[in-house]
């Protein structure tokens, strides 16, 4: 009789402490968002009471920041789109095509995701410089697509090999062409997988720093580049810095909230099944 | 293994292979071709800021230089420390968090989402927030805490502490992703086995040690591989916080490659370090996969 209420209280306490742990873990970011609404005097030294103000945002939202934000959006969206366009057919060919050694292809794509990007940075710098394409959005999109495609292949191969062959056969017996079977039967089945792999590519592209900082400057720099420059130039103004940083991270964090678990399913089901 | 459904669909497929060509070409051009150039460049003497000095073949001089350079070995050791310590700490932490958060309570989705925020934050922001708001000895949380205990704030970026601070940041960044993988794993465990263990009177610790950990092995391995791959490549955090310093005390191989190329402008030497980095990465990943296979076969 008395155990039920005790259990309930323990359950509530457990839930509260788990919330506490989660908040403590992300405290640096939460504190950053919080600081972005404080005036500079209230941040250093930190005071817990403050008058919320949008002053920092008003100061930091400049044409320069907005142009970097636009670059980030354009580069990321183009990359996700191109990655889908190029990656999905590769996965399709690996699973359903007539490659002589499909597993060799699959492994090759996975290996490329393992290798450090610094290993190609000088040649790419020299080539891009030689082509006169330093500081251009096109180069970033191309580089990020090459990072995204192997990831897309990895995840989509998994989703596609989960599709029962009989479904595609049935579609073809019913007189569907190969293209119809692909676009009207298979794509809808793996739609969830496509969305979560696109999200993963989105987050990775949005946050990419090494290539961005090496190949772009003021014209086509993305938010990580802006962030880095802001730190060097105005690193003493923590309130403004927090505001810029909040703007820079808000989109991927929201996407992460939305996607949460489905995000890693594609990576997992392939790797764990064996 | 992935089943390829070659036999199943009996249509002419040769044209289908062309379908994969554009993707293949892009990845090939951006990754493999430049890497071949890197390999060639590693045998060349080339200072990018001195056009007057000819670019010249110099055999294995670059390799001799780095293999006799103390800084290189310091950086190699740092890379090893960052990878191993961050990976082990993050895995243990992620496992404990996964155990704790693998239950239902109101708002569990929100709590989990809060926990995984760091994974979605770009490295420059991670670096900046920790360097200023958190760890700054003057006005950061570091100072608040130190005052509360009446001690002097720790200088997290001194030559003694810089590397440890980098490890701290890496752990903080990667634990959430490993947590997600392990949580999926825990939720996929066969309920009957755990129930049977419970009925047989296995305590909580016993359940974890004798049932959950062995059953979770594939997930722990996947988390390990992901952590390993990404921790070997750490760059942005170092770039923003310590610039590899003081000296090279907190530089890892990727950062050192970058610095040799874009601060010292030694293209050839930097290429040689890249080649060594790639070879080491391949060796480490192979060893990792092989030990896993051995453990599984045993």
Image (cartoon, coloured by chain):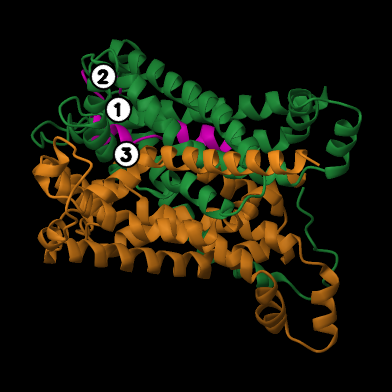
On screen, residue B149 above or below B240: above
Give the residue pinned by disc 2. Answer: B248
Q: Do the residues labelled 2 and 3 touch (CB within 8 Å)?
A: no
Question: Mark 1 vs mark 2: same chain?
Answer: yes
Measured as percent of width and height from the top left, residue A181 is found at 72, 80
Circle 3 SS class: helix
Residue at figure coordinates x 33%, y 20% from the top left: B163
Q: Mark 3 points at which residue?
A: B236
- The quarter holding residue B156 reads top left
Image check: A105 left or right of B39? right
What span is colored magenta in the figure? B225-250
Q: How far apart are marks 1 and 3 (CA)?
A: 12 Å
Instruction: Please tell me if label 1 and label 3 are on a single chain.
Output: yes
Q: Could you tell me which chain the residue with mark 3 belongs to?
A: B
Q: Residue furthest bottom?
A: A175
Mark 1 nearby-residue class (10 Å; few <14, some 14–19, many ≥20)? many
Q: Which chain is orange?
A: A
Residue on which the image places disc 1: B256
Which is more N-terminal, label 3 or label 1? Answer: 3
Q: What letter labels the chain drawn in green? A: B
Asked if the residue under mark 2 is in contact with the one under mark 1, i.e. CB atoms within 8 Å, the reply is yes
Mark 2 or 3, nearer chain start: 3
Q: In front here: A11 or A164?
A: A11
């Amino acid at each position: 009789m008395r155990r039920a209420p005790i259990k309930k209280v323990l359950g509530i306490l457990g839930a509260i402490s788990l919330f506490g742990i989660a908040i403590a873990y992300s405290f640096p970011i939460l504190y950053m968002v919080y600081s972005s609404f404080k005036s500079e005097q209230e941040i250093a030294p930190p005071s817990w009471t403050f008058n919320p103000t949008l002053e920092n945002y008003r100061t930091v939202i400049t044409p320069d920041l907005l142009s970097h934000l636009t670059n980030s959006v354009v580069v990321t969206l183009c990359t996700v789109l191109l990655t889908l366009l190029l990656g999905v057919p590769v996965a399709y060919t690996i699973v359903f095509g007539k490659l002589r050694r499909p597993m060799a292809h699959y492994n090759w794509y996975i290996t490329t995701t393992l290798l450090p990007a610094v290993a190609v940075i000088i040649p790419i710098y020299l080539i891009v410089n030689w082509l006169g394409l330093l500081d251009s959005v096109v180069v970033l999109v191309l580089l990020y697509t090459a990072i995204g495609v192997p990831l897309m292949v990895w995840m989509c191969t998994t989703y596609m090999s989960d599709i029962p062959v009989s479904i595609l056969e049935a579609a073809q017996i019913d007189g569907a062409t190969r293209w119809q079977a692909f676009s009207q039967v298979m794509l809808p089945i793996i739609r969830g997988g496509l969305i979560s792999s696109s999200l993963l590519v989105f987050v990775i592209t949005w946050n990419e720093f090494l290539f961005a900082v090496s190949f772009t400057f003021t014209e086509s720099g993305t938010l990580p580049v802006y962030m880095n420059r802001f730190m060097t130039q105005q690193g003493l103004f923590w309130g403004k810095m927090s505001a810029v940083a909040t703007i820079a991270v808000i989109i991927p964090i929201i996407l992460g909230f939305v996607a949460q678990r489905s995000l890693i399913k594609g990576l997992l089901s392939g790797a764990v099944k064996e | 293994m992935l089943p390829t459904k070659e036999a199943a669909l009996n249509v002419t497929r040769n044209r289908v292979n062309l379908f994969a060509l554009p993707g293949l070409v892009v990845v090939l051009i951006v990754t493999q071709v430049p890497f071949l150039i890197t390999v060639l460049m590693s045998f060349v003497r080339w200072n990018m800021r001195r056009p007057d000095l000819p670019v010249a073949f110099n055999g294995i001089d670059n390799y001799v230089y780095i293999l006799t350079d103390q800084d290189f070995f310091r950086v190699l050791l740092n890379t090893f420390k960052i990878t191993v310590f961050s990976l082990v700490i993050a895995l243990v932490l992620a496992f404990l968090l996964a155990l704790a958060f693998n239950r239902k309570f109101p708002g569990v989705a929100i709590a989990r989402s809060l926990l995984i925020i760091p994974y979605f934050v770009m490295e420059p922001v991670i670096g900046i927030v920790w360097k200023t708001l958190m760890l700054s000895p003057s006005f950061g949380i570091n100072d608040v805490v130190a005052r509360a205990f009446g001690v002097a704030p720790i200088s997290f970026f001194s030559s003694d502490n810089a590397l440890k601070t980098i490890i701290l940041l890496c752990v903080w960044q990667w634990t959430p992703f490993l947590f997600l993988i392990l949580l999926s794993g825990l939720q996929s465990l066969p309920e009957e086995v755990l129930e049977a263990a419970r009925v047989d009177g296995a305590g909580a610790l016993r359940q974890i040690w004798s049932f959950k950990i062995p059953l979770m092995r594939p997930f722990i391995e996947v988390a390990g591989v992901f952590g390993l791959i990404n921790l070997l490549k750490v760059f942005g955090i170092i770039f923003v916080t310590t610039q590899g310093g003081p000296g090279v005390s907190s530089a890892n191989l990727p950062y050192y490659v970058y610095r040799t190329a874009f601060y010292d402008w030694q293209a050839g030497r930097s290429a040689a370090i890249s080649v060594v980095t790639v070879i080491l990465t391949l060796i480490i990943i192979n060893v990792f996969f092989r030990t896993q296979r051995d453990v599984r076969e045993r």
